[in-house]
Image (cartoon, rainbow, N blue to C red):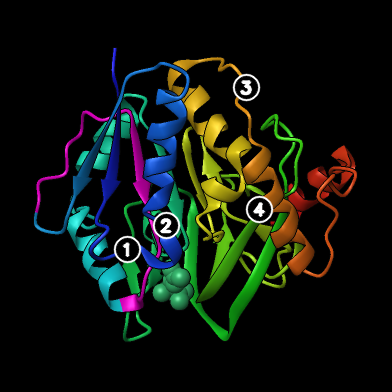
């Protein structure tokens, strides 16, 4: 079996090295002797519904709206939705997260339909969030290390009851300063505001996504990635790389109830 990773629209959505997330996923499989192939879909190409794992990056408002159109946001059956129905994993960053939601803000500030794979909605915020982002992963994901990323977005995202945030923000803004959380996840569809590229900084997160496709994975030597994560967390105001003692179950329950 060869795992197929599909990078969607790097010509539209690929700021801050986000396309590298797809390379990282393929390479982490190959390092373990698992066959993997990368399919790159540019705007105008037909989006396949048969891949195992899809990667969507972030970008400016205009290309973001084009990417949503390309993904068939307004049609009843987008290839991506069909792939997810068949069990595919999707990892989306920033604009990618926004267009996978139910609605997002277009270049004119007006609300536009998203692909609807995540129960979240994005509207224009008052102030752009720019800088390092550090996130304690949600309980239940099996991740123990604080996640590191870089954020630059004007949109403010609200997560509905059909999804869960990716985690609790410990530095930076994430979905909104009011919510205190970052990202959204429903089943195997996961979005975050973390650029960086996120999977270079957080190999745990890459392996979480890969594990959903191929099952348990043997560990790799992530010394270099760990050093990168450590440095970036230090740049995020001295967030300890060893974790902020995790999220207390009652804190997470309160966060989910507050929505
Ligand atoms: N255009 C979106 C916003 O500003 C997403 C930006 C991004 O992907 N970095 O909110």
Mark linked to residue 63: none
> Mark 1 near ligand 1 (CB under 8 Å)?
yes
Q: Nearer the viewer, mark 3 or mark 1?
A: 3
- Number of marks drawn: 4
> Mark 3 near ligand 1 (CB under 8 Å)?
no
Q: Earlier in the sequence, mark 3 or mark 2?
A: 2
> Mark 4 near ligand 1 (CB under 8 Å)?
no
Quarter occupied by residue 53: top left
**Which residue in the structure is indicated by mark 3?**
219
Q: Is residue 156 magenta?
A: no
Residue found at x 71% / y 70%: 172
- Above or below, 235 relative to 75: below
User: Marks 4 and 2: CB-CB under 8 Å?
Assistant: no
Q: Quadrant of the N terminus?
A: top left
Q: Quadrant of the C terminus?
A: bottom right
Q: Nearer the viewer, mark 2 or mark 1?
A: 2
Q: Which residues are magenta?
A: 45-61
Q: Secondary structure at mark 3?
A: loop
**Which residue in the structure is indicated by mark 1?**
13
Q: Secondary structure at mark 2?
A: loop
Relative to residue 234, is residue 158 drawn left or right?
A: left
Whole-number angstrom distance, CA of label 4 to CA of label 3: 18 Å
Q: Nearer the viewer, mark 3 or mark 2?
A: 3
Whole-number angstrom distance, CA of label 2 to CA of label 1: 8 Å
User: Marks 3 and 1: CB-CB under 8 Å?
Assistant: no
**Which residue in the structure is indicated by mark 2?**
18
Q: Is residue 58 magenta?
A: yes
Whole-number angstrom distance, CA of label 3 to CA of label 2: 23 Å
Q: Residues within 10 Å of mark 2 (few under 14, many from 20)?
A: many
Q: Nearer the viewer, residue 43 or 127?
A: 43
Residue found at x 34% / y 40%: 54
Q: Earlier in the sequence, mark 4 or mark 2?
A: 2
């Amino acid at each position: 079996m060869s795992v197929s990773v599909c990078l969607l629209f790097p010509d539209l959505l690929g700021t801050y090295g986000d396309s590298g997330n797809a390379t990282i996923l393929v390479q982490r499989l190959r390092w373990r002797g698992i066959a993997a192939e990368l399919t790159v879909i540019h705007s105008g190409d037909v989006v396949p519904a048969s891949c195992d794992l899809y990667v969507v990056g972030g970008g400016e408002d205009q290309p973001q709206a084009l990417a949503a159109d390309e993904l068939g946001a307004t049609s009843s059956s987008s290839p991506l939705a069909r792939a997810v129905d068949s069990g595919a994993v999707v990892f989306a960053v920033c604009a990618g997260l926004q267009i996978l939601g139910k609605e997002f803000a277009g270049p004119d500030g007006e609300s536009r339909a998203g692909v609807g794979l995540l129960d979240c909605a994005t509207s224009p915020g008052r102030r752009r969030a720019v800088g390092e982002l550090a996130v304690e992963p949600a309980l239940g994901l099996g991740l123990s290390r604080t996640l590191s990323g870089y954020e630059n977005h004007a949109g403010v995202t609200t997560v509905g009851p059909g999804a869960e945030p990716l985690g609790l923000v410990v530095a930076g803004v994430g979905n909104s300063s009011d919510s205190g959380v970052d990202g959204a996840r429903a089943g195997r569809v996961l979005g975050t505001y973390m650029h960086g590229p996120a999977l270079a900084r957080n190999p745990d997160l890459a392996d979480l996504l890969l594990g959903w496709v191929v099952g348990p994975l043997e560990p790799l030597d992530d010394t270099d990635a760990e050093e990168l994560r450590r440095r970036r967390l230090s740049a995020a105001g001295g967030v300890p790389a060893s974790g902020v003692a995790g999220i207390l179950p009652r804190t997470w329950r309160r966060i989910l109830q507050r929505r």
